[in-house]
Image (cartoon, rainbow, N blue to C red):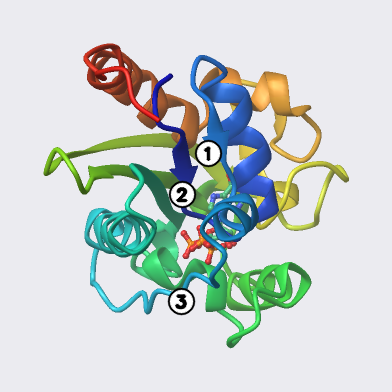
Amino acid sequence: MTRPLVFATRNQGKLVELRALLPELEVLSIDEAEARIGRAIPEVEEDRPTFAGNAEKKAREVADFTQLPALADDSGLEVDALGGAPGVYSARYAGHGHDDAANNAKLLAELTTVPAAERAGRFRCALAFWDPQAGIGHTFEGRCEGTILEAPRGTGGFGYDPLFYSPELGATFAEAGVGTKNNLSHRARAMASMKPWVLAVFAREPASE
Ligand code: ITT
């Protein structure tokens, strides 16, 4: 039996998408990993200036703590008219607490005077893997271009999805189901790059436990 992979995220929206993107492996959520090791996994301070840096920090700290391979996602929205903000601060744009409604309200307020043609942006995602026993890791990135609407559309997804219009989809991410979003999102593209590599790592797993 191979070891499970811990998805090192406390964001339920990400977890749902990641599980659907990697059905080939046995994965544990943070809650399931905590139940397995019988201890609470400490919060990781996201203090790196890049998505990749934060993803690597989250994967390493959770993997080292649990002694299980871990995959972490650091992602966010970059808006050109805001000089790339909210970027790595996407989750706490309106302050700490992961309040999607407050973050979306702040984004709309910051863009009030910006016309539709100048509201280009993109979601970016870094996926980092770290195996504490083998001492190997790798980070993969993906992005998805779009524009920021002047009012929310759709009720699905999470985070900035209701404001992010994808020309490729012809809809916002909140109007698409998980399956449709997973065809082209920043997270899906990072996973498409990562998947052959990570499956090869697990294919080399010796029988254990
Ligand atoms: P973890 O660190 O526990 O994974 P988090 O929500 O704090 O959860 P991040 O620091 O990577 O994760 O912040 C990502 C934020 O960027 C997220 O909270 C959303 O506001 C936004 N975001 C990222 N991907 C998104 C997506 O697919 N759709 C909508 N918003 C997204």
Image height of 73 relative to 177, above or below: below
Q: Residues within 10 Å of mark 2 (few under 14, many from 20)?
A: many
Location of residue 195 in the rendering, given as x and y in whole percent from the top left corner: 35, 19
Taking 155 as reference, is 69 left or right?
A: left
> Which of 75/41 is in front?
41
Image height of 93 relative to 21, above or below: below
Instruction: Give how far apart the Cα atoms at labels 2 and 3 are.
Output: 33 Å
Q: Which quadrant holds the N terminus? A: top left
Q: Quadrant of residue 64?
A: bottom left
Location of residue 135 in the rendering, given as x and y in whole percent from the top left corner: 11, 44
Q: Quadrant of residue 151?
A: bottom right
> Mark 1 or mark 3, which is nearer the start of the sequence?
3
Q: Amino acid at mark 3?
A: Pro
Q: Amino acid at mark 2?
A: Gly
The reply to whether dot 2 and dot 1 touch (C-beta < 8 Å) is yes
Q: Residue at x 26, y 58 (%)?
A: 60
Q: Which label was assigned to residue 146?
A: 1
Q: Residue at x 57, y 52 (%)?
A: 36
> Which of 137/152 is in front?
137
Label 3 sits on residue: 42
Q: Residue furthest left?
A: 135
Question: What secondary structure is marked by label 3?
Answer: loop
> Mark 3 or mark 2, which is nearer the start of the sequence?
3
Q: Residues within 10 Å of mark 1 (few under 14, many from 20)?
A: many
Q: Nearer the viewer, mark 2 or mark 3?
A: 3
Q: Residue at x 40, y 64 (%)?
A: 87
Taking 103 as reference, is 198 left or right?
A: left
Q: Residues within 10 Å of mark 3 (few under 14, many from 20)?
A: few
Q: Which label was assigned to residue 121?
A: 2
Q: Which quadrant holds the C terminus? A: top left
